[in-house]
Image (cartoon, rainbow, N blue to C red):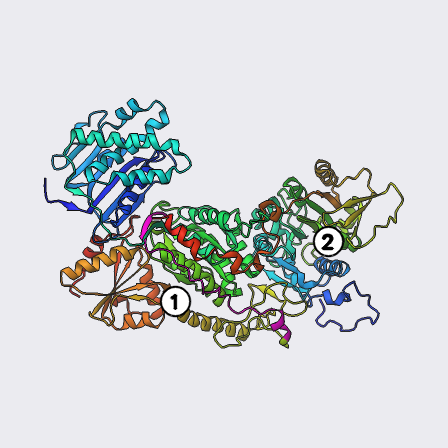
Amino acid sequence: MSEIKTNDFVIRFANVNGTGSASANALFTKAIFRMGIPVTPKNIFPSNIQGLPTWYEVRVSEKGYLGRREGIDLMVCVNPQSMARDVESVKAGGYFLYDSTKPLHSQFIRDDINYIGIPMTELCNLAFSDARQRQLFKNIVYVGALSALFEIEFDVLIELLGEQFKGKERLIEPNITALKMGVEYVHQNYEYPLDIRVERRDLLGDSILMNGNTACALGAIYAGATVAAWYPITPSTSVVDAFAKYAEKLRVDKTTGKKNFAVVQAEDELAAIGMVIGANWNGARSFTATSGPGVSLMNEFLGLAYFAEIPTVLIDVQRAGPSTGMPTRTQQSDILEAAYASHGDTKHVLLFPASPKECFEFTAESFDYAEKLQTPVIVMTDLDLGMNDHVSAPLKWDEDCGYQRGKVLDAAALDKLERYGRYLDVDEDGIPYRTIPGTHISKGGFVTRGTSRDEYAVYTEDGEIYRRNMDRLIKKWNTAKEIVPAPEFYQETNLSKHGVLFFGTSTYAAEEAIELLKQEQISLDPMRVKAFPFGEAFADFINSHEKVFVIEQNRDAQFRSLMMIELGVNPEKIVSVLNYDGTPITADNILKQIKTNLPI
Amino acid sequence: MSYVRSKFRHPMLPVNDLGYTVDFYEGSLSTLCAGCGHDSISAAIAQACFELSIEPHKVAKLSGIGCSSKTPAYFLNNSHGFNSVHGRMPSVATGANLANRDLIYLGVSGDGDTASIGMGQFVHVIRRNLNMVYIVMNNGCYGLTKGQDSATADVGSKNKAGSVNLFETIDLASLAIELGATFVAQSFSGDKDQLIPLIKAGMSHPGFAFINVISPCVTFNNNAGSTKSYDYVREHIEATATVDFVPIMKEIRADYEEGSVESLKMHDGSFIQLHKLAKDWNPTDRVSAINAVQTAKAKNEILTGLLYMNPDSTDLHELIQTSDRPLNKLTKKELCPGSEVLQGINDSFR
């Protein structure tokens, strides 16, 4: 036995899609979470419902590093299809846990790793008669075995099963039986616990374990969104699913049974965004959720919303493109597409949440920003944040904070006006006043259009008037810089010649890499970006560093381009740190790329 | 087109129940070609709203792109309008309607906007039975891009450039009935006596009311050989029954002989009176409606009038059970579950 590593390892489960492994694996993760230990699970799954290999990777980290880490300490392999590759991916000295009902073929034997055979199929065939149970409980047997090997508290597992099967209590007993079968087999046949193991801590405080899509949905519920229109697309589908689920619980009038919301599954993404624009135009808060291919289809409408100045909220859960790309793998590769969606001179406000808490807050705030600025706001999450559970600070709602609906004139305000001008820049911040249809019998009506018009919304092709309007939209864009969330800095004043910036899910691995660099006496000033357009603090940070590393998860360094386009940053000043294989970026990867470029 | 509109109004113009004269329902000066059928339809819409005593700001007028889609600027100046993107008006109308079920939604589209680029949205807005009036100003050609054939051009019809359409035409009325539209009518822009009551009835119908109006393009599709020219349409039109629309507040008067008038009660209590000029016309029978439209078509005729109506229509709001109060009127108090509930949600993720 080598050195004991407590609360610091990576375990990967190699399963067959559609065999019920997901809930068993989630049970494993949740148990570690309940023991107060930082844990981060990642689904690495195929675009398939049944039959193809799927992996679930869990990192346990006493230090609280919640990014993905390379190197597998223990592999649970119940999928013969992927076994050759799975055996290979275990670290030297690591463990390979497999179904030993049939002997392992000699080609899978490495002499530098340890094998733990559990006859899962045999045990389940003996204990259960139903074919489905025999399949499902194999997963629970390995969770039982792992609990013995890692010393996961058995009571915690029992407690979790009780919660999971509340209302279906008859399912609890066979689950416990299966867990115990795994535990007992380990107790009788192997030395336990392993040198990698867990131990109860109190490191998580009041944290929650939630995925970003659920958090975005709750943000929309809390912000008062009433119309959700969407077209199913991985990995965004569960945003609207969760919105509908919570709305059914929280938004149904108890006396009438009528719904204070509407969810429409549209015929395509074009219709989805069209409905969102129609509803917002008519004074309801409305949103859609999609992924890259959907954003491509929504481009024309996004240009209309920008030019006609209609609040619009879009949640883009990014995946690996281009085209259909890798629909079940993660990337941050819609940055340029979203920033400049549509033909003509358009640009859009982007928000970059990094945690479920921020998914909730940024989604809720996006409705305020969209209505204040009367423009599309795109919440940029990704598959990793959206579909994987993350340890996060709890969601918080400030009761005193009202909905900020922006500049809307009611009938009384219209009565006081001699003539209403939809596109008049009354306050000189580039943001005009809007009216909602049906407000006033003879004032405030106009035709909203994507064609050029004057300040009174009257159609015109006068070049000077068109230019004036386009310039006002830039004035509004500059106002947006002051409204959207400022970047987060990790230092009061700059300590280094060089900076490093990152956003969204790159944050986890970036923070870890920065600490690791510090241990090697390499210091960089970090900045976490939360929004586009870039404000003054962002520009100051770039200007006050010689070189800036930009960490992003796409091939073309899209965020770097955005900095060059918007701020004219000298390309030589920006050193890109990239990852685009579809898996979440790791600290090791960042470290390697930064060190290759040091000293600079 | 004229460049200046006369401000003169007859001092004795009749007023409606709200005390407004018809000019309160007019729009800006049209920029369409002189003699365009679309302008007659715009006038019919204004007249219908005037006669129904609708407050103009309670109407939202929406359109896509094309000559027809320009018209919302040419009627109901006091209404909000939305000239959206090509073929996508139905989705914008759907969102708008979901936000506020209390307004009247009037969509205007063309044959290119509906039967080609917008076919997908047209089909699905029918399926959802969105409560709106959807008027297609159908001229069988693309006007703004100078006369290309549209998908509603008849096989063998000749366009202005002299080329003959080779492809099967899309018959929007048959399609709408087939897809389950709950109100389908067909008319001709030059027949306001028929068109105005149809628009009024459509506005009272609680669901998707589709009116396909043949509206000849004077500039690009009014030539000999076109089956959507004024002359061709006048010669080949066949009316079903003529329709009178009686709003809820008016007493029904049978102006016609017993046996030739049929009253259909609408959801809101108003009536449609059908003068049965055509034999055995029953607008509530879907199968015979499709049959009649197709039979007329086989004879190169255009069947006009109220082709089909389902008096028990259930609109989208009823189908998905949204609140009676418009969603856009709900406040934070009704919409936000509050921090205590959020505590409970947080707990369920621990």
Q: Is residue A137 left or right of residue B199?
A: left
> How many marks are shown on the rendered structure?
2
The residue pinned by badge 2 equals: B199
Chain letter belonging to callout 1: A
Compared to B30, does B308 lie above or below?
above
Compared to A404, does A187 lie above or below?
above
State which region is magenta: A387-415
Task: Provide residue A441's location: percent of width, then percent of height.
Answer: 68, 67
Q: Quick one: B21 or A182, which is closer to the camera?
A: A182
Q: Are marks 1 and 2 on the same chain?
A: no
Amino acid identity at mark 1: Pro
**Quadrant placement of the N terminus of chain A:** top left
Snapshot quadrant of residue B16 = bottom right
Task: Provide residue A104's location: percent of width, then percent of height.
Answer: 19, 28
Mark 2 lies on a secondary structure that is helix
- Is residue A447 a member of the stretch shown in magenta? no
Q: Residue at x 87, y 48 (%)?
A: B254
Report how far apart the C-alphas of labels 1 and 2 lie in the structure.
48 Å
Q: Quick one: A36 or A486, which is closer to the camera?
A: A36
Task: Provide residue A299's location: percent of width, then percent of height.
Answer: 47, 57
Q: Quick one: A457 or A399, which is closer to the camera?
A: A399
Q: Residues within 10 Å of mark 1 (few under 14, many from 20)?
A: many
For the stretch drawn in magenta, what is the main secondary structure?
loop
Compared to B206, does B1 lie above or below?
below
Which numbered circle lies on residue A533?
1
Chain letter belonging to callout 2: B
Q: Is residue B56 left or right of residue A430?
A: right
Residue that sits furthest to the right in the current view: B257
Amino acid identity at mark 2: Ile
